[in-house]
Image (spheres, rainbow, N blue to C red):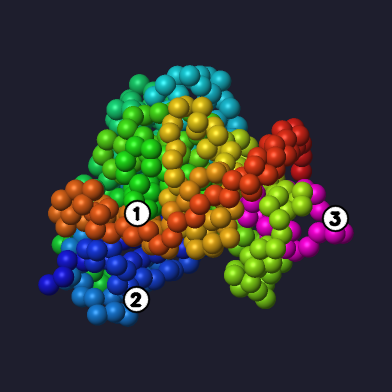
Amino acid sequence: MRKLLLGIDIGTSACKVAVFDKSGEVLAQTNEPYQLFYPAPGYVEQDPDEWWEAICTGIKKVLAQSDISAEEIVGIGIDGQSWSAIPVDKDGNCLSRTPIWMDTRARDICEKVKEEVGFDTIFRVAGNDFLPSYSTPKMLWFKQEKPEVYENTYKFLQSNSYIGYKLTGVMSQDLSQGYGIHFFNNETCTYDAELAEKLGLSVDKVPDLYQCHAVIGTVTAAAAEKTGLKEGTKVVAGGLDAACGTLGAGVYLPGQTQEQGGQAGGMSICVDHALAHPKLILSPHVVPGMWLLQGGTVGGGGTLRWFKQEFGQDMSFDELTALAEDIPAGSDGVTYLPFMSGERSPIWDPDAKGVYYGLGFDKTKGHMVRATLEGVAYSLEHNLRVAAETGAQVGELIAMGGASNSILWTQIKADVTGKTIKVPTSDTATTLGAAILAGVGVGVYESFEEAIKETIVITRVQEPDMEAHAKYQESMKLYLELIDALTPIFDRK
């Protein structure tokens, strides 16, 4: 009987469910959408029970539309979007929709906490700034604004740990998602009860910590009936989507760097110690003993998706990007700031706005498309420049996510950064990373090194055009000058 692995990815707009064999080949996969809610300015929420229903539907489809038997699945790995704060009671009932990573409702709370507790006190433990996108301020928001929910909350869960609970009945907190909780010590990978108390929280409100590949439990009878999975199938803790995607792209050694091309953008540099920068994001990798110095941006593939929705409804993505192919590097001065829902690293400004600068009667839709692609590449380069301040070494980039399917967009990123970009099997990197965690956890692979060698295949390599790179260095100056000039008025309505 085959030993197959199931990967579940809880994305921002949809969940992916995929079954892999030991070689990393996708045997079956599905994509199930769910809703985003915007109940007030700065609020961005999702319903975790909608995730669960979508995942159940996806698993049933995968099993029904293939020759895969539930008995062949020997391990399940789950990855999820960052910075959830899902309040559940002792019976595991979800008490509220969760604010997601784009939510900035806790801005005032953050300012108050940093003033009262001190930035240095928090950063010394967390290795990250105290910002409204993270889980901790959202917990405090529940405590302040919805005290009845907070009082009835047994544990706050992350996206993957909530699905892990629905599958196994076990509440867990994997190490790679721990960084969203500021009383999680990023260096020792333990909770700091003293800092939790200073923040007005308690370690009792979060689950026990698990290595990402650790088996937390097995599929219960109720979950088996709901999903079609076999009761008793092992489930591992899983981890952060960006970290699983980094693993699924083959990044697990110091210096290797993943370039993110999903709904959001950014990069993840693998380091062998907790290397922090206040303008970046530090988290443990899903690979034990490694950390990821990350730049997470709002502007990624979602920016082009928005542009297509508003200005290219009758075109495919390939047709849309083809308009940009004959536009020169720098888009004849049209510059795009991809801050469509504020911006995360490295500017951390929830008021930041998306901007097209340099439009004129001589500019075309092609200019705007190319500027969109370039703006996302500029945000990547901005993060890489800040990371260099820590001494982090970045060689080649390994791309993942749907955007890496675009040869043009990947080339623009190579030209802007001056880095060689390698593209593995991009569409499945994140679910593959989750499946690899399951494979290591249940013994399908003896080590992460074996898993990478077995599963990762590079499909193409794109070298930077250094002449274009020199031109883009000038464009980067304008990009940064625009940020500096507009920051003082970003908060105007």
- Res. 357 in view: yes
Q: CA distance from mark 2 to mark 1?
A: 23 Å
- At horizontal 38% and vertical 38% (from top left) the residue drawn is 255
At 32% from the left and 44% from the top, the residue drawn is: 252
Q: Going 24% across and 58% down the picture, which residue do you hit? A: 454
The front one of 161 and 378 is 378
Q: Is residue 192 magenta?
A: no
The amino acid type found where label 1 is placed reads Gly
x and y, in percent, of residue 33 in the image: 48, 67
Q: Residue 238: x and y, percent?
A: 30, 50
| Mark 2, other Cα within 10 Å: few <14 / some 14–19 / many ≥20 | some
Q: Which residue is mark 3?
A: 360
Is residue 373 in the magenta section?
yes
Give the amino acid at mark 3: Gly
Sequence-first tag of 1 and 3:
1
Q: Say the numbered circle drawn on residue 248.
A: 1
Q: Which residue is mark 2?
A: 61
Mark 2 or mark 1: whose residue is earlier in sequence: 2
Q: Is residue 351 visible?
A: no
Give the magenta-colored segment's residue range.
354-376
